[in-house]
Amino acid sequence: MIPSARRISWANGLMAAVFVTMTTGSVSAQTPPSRLDPLVRASARRLAIAEQVALSKWDSGAAVEDETREAQVIVGAIRAGDAKGIDSVSMTRFFKAQIEANKVVQYSLLADWRRDGGAPAHTPIDLAKTIRPELDQLQAELIAELASTKDIRSGANCRVEMATAIGNYLQAHHKGASKLNEIALDRALSESCIHPTSGSTP
């Protein structure tokens, strides 16, 4: 459970990390930059939006699961990925992992707010007009990064390199933060590596 005083801090931490890495150009002055860093940052930015989605669903009473929307995201990703030479299996698995990670955050925050007796104070959030356009933009960024890192993601050492890039990101920006940060980001990027023979993750 995320303590009450920090109910909103995990997403704020993610956004602060994004700002730092965008302005400094690397996750740490002592850590050599990786070509996977932009993919990690884009995924972290997508996860940071999960809190806004959760707040919107808290207000509306809507379920976390939205199969229609999830299917739309996957279909759109497959079409965009095909234009960049990314196979549909890899694209489906990657964005399913992104969606599942987002839902992990939503479920965790909603349960925490129920235990605490309410969500943090916030202005009304329009999921369709405000949040989904942001997610669509991030989807385009993620697909671009997937295309530009295809060689790395196809390599035998991909899982180690991805785990290292995530670890460096979290170590640089989330010391002392909730374990939810680590779990969600690991889950979001768990289907990033491509099996060299099948075009999909093993």
Image: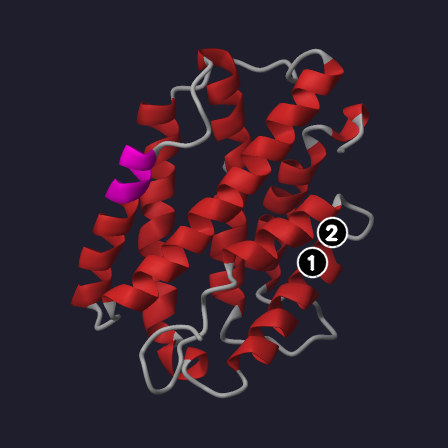
Q: Give SS at disc 1.
A: helix
Q: Residue at x 63, y 33 (%)?
A: 108
Q: Is residue 101 left or right of residue 66?
A: right
Residue closer to the observer: 175 or 18:
175
Residue closer to the observer: 172 or 112:
112
Q: Residue 197's spot in the image, x, y percent? A: 34, 87
Main SS of the magenta segment? helix
Q: Is residue 49 left or right of residue 6?
A: left
Quadrant assignment for the N terminus: top right
Residue 52's disc number: none
Q: Quadrant of residue 95?
A: bottom left
Q: CA distance from mark 2 to mark 1?
A: 5 Å
Q: Residue at x 67, y 12 (%)?
A: 118
Q: Give SS at disc 2.
A: loop
Q: Amino acid at mark 2?
A: His
* Residue on which disc 1 sits: 170
